[in-house]
Image (tube, rainbow, N blue to C red):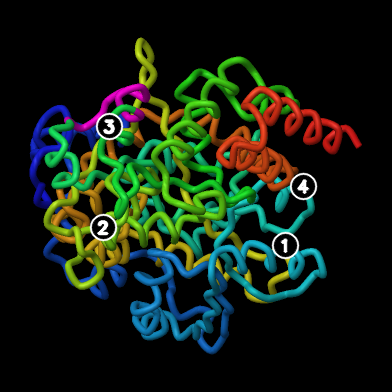
Amino acid sequence: MAQGENSLSHPASRRSFIKGLGAAGAGLTALPRWGFAEDSAAANANAAIDWKQFAGQTIALSGAIHPWSNAIAPLLPEFTILTGINVTIDFQLETTYLGALPIRLARGSSTPDVFMFTTYGQGITNGWVEPLNGYYSMKSLTDPAWYDESDLLKTARAFPLWSDSERYAVPITSEATTLFINSDALAAKDQPVPQTFDELLVTAKAVKSNGMSGIAMRAQASGNSSPPAMGFLFSYGGAMVEHNRVVFASPEGIAAVEMYGQLLGQAGPAGVGSYEWYHVLDDFLQGRTAMAIDSSNFATDISNPAKSRVAKQAGFATFPHLAGRGPVPFMSHWQACINSKSRNKRAAFLFLLWATGKATSLQTAAAGLATTRVSAWSSEGFRKAFGPQAAEAALINLQNADVDRAKAILFHPQSRLILDAFMIGVNEVVNGAKSAKDAMTGAAERANAAIRG
């Protein structure tokens, strides 16, 4: 199936897409139009902000090698021209970055000034991240009319709010777990796009061959591999954490992980127990798997003929569901924070405003980045770069996601420990070392004991 053809239950159309944006934007009656024709520099110059007030300062930006870092890096000279603030960058492989950053912050380093972040609760509890509400209220720093928070997706507005309504981060991307389809592989076996988990298992087994797995998903025994499996857990009615207790060993959680293990054990690639996101993506790009489930942000690579052997037959679909229940894919917003020890906090905040403003978001969206802004999602540049079908699938999956369940685990002060325990259990099931019941019960017990300790 070529990019743009239908793999959803209905064809992707601009009318249905904009209707979905209205729901995601909560209360929008019309999409902003000004940014599509305006020059980025002129649009930023219209802000009631003295962009040059910190000219001469240098801020250090750190993050993972990721669609956001790939999209924002080429635009940094524009920020320097606008503000006079220089930006140094340090982007690393995601696993390396996520492992090293907490160590650096715990040592009290004043750099990086701005960093991509996922373990929000840990950062807040340990005092690593700067509270931002006060910066938003400073007239010298923020022009609310120019920034226009009503243009943010509903999930992006809700995501950074802590229990005390303070914000310690700014969302920079939007993503949800999505089903990727090699339509030629399914057509060769006369298989429709699966809607339920049971159908997914049947299809994956039917299309598996000596040269192609039926489905690829993350299964490495590391918390970084958890998003697809958490989508299964949530869709079966389970949760990761409730009332500061790990609850993924519930009957719903055990059933979800059992299905995950069946899919990868019976139709997954060889060695799938070591798979991280880049293994999943590479298998799909090279035509080594008929289906995959992972971040919606993979769409730009999948649809790029220079990177993907399956660009012409790639399809994008909504996350599967349990019969009788709606799908609840895992969703998240990568966030950017300011180091509480930074010596350049106000310059860092100006950077975050610029990086997530309408004008910059239109530019990064044109590079295929799924930003947090309605105006960027609705732009022709984004739909062309990301693909209309992929954009609609991602938007539907974002709408179906449960922000509170995602935040409950992502914002937990010991989220990394819990996610690691969860994926150790999932890995044991995928590798056939333990039953889902034994693996998840043991993983939950270990995690709860560590939390109590």
Disc 2 is placed on an element classified as loop
Disc 4 is placed on an element classified as helix
Q: Residue furthest top?
A: 324
Between 230 and 267, the one lying in front of the other is 267
Regarding residue 18, the answer to whether it shows in the image is no
In the rendered image, residue 416, in percent from the top left (x then y), is placed at 69, 47
Magenta region, residue range: 192-201
Which class describes the residues within 10 Å of circle 4: few (<14), some (14-19), or many (20+)?
few
Which class describes the residues within 10 Å of circle 1: few (<14), some (14-19), or many (20+)?
some
**Image position of 182 (left or right of 3):** right
Residue type beneath disc 1: Pro
> Residue at 14% of width from left, 47% of height from top?
184
- Residues at marks 4 and 1, CA–CA distance in whole angstroms: 12 Å
Residue type beneath disc 3: Thr
Q: Earlier in the sequence, mark 2 or mark 1?
A: 1
Query: Which circle marks residue 203 in the picture?
Result: 3
The number of discs equals 4
Q: Nearer the viewer, mark 4 or mark 1?
A: 1
Disc 1 is placed on an element classified as helix
Reading the image, the residue beneath label 1 is 102
Q: Earlier in the sequence, mark 3 or mark 1?
A: 1
In the rendered image, residue 49, in percent from the top left (x then y), is placed at 42, 68
Q: Nearer the viewer, mark 4 or mark 3?
A: 3
Reading the image, the residue beneath label 4 is 125
Disc 3 is placed on an element classified as helix
Between 362 and 194, the one lying in front of the other is 194
> Residue at 54% of width from left, 89% of height from top?
56
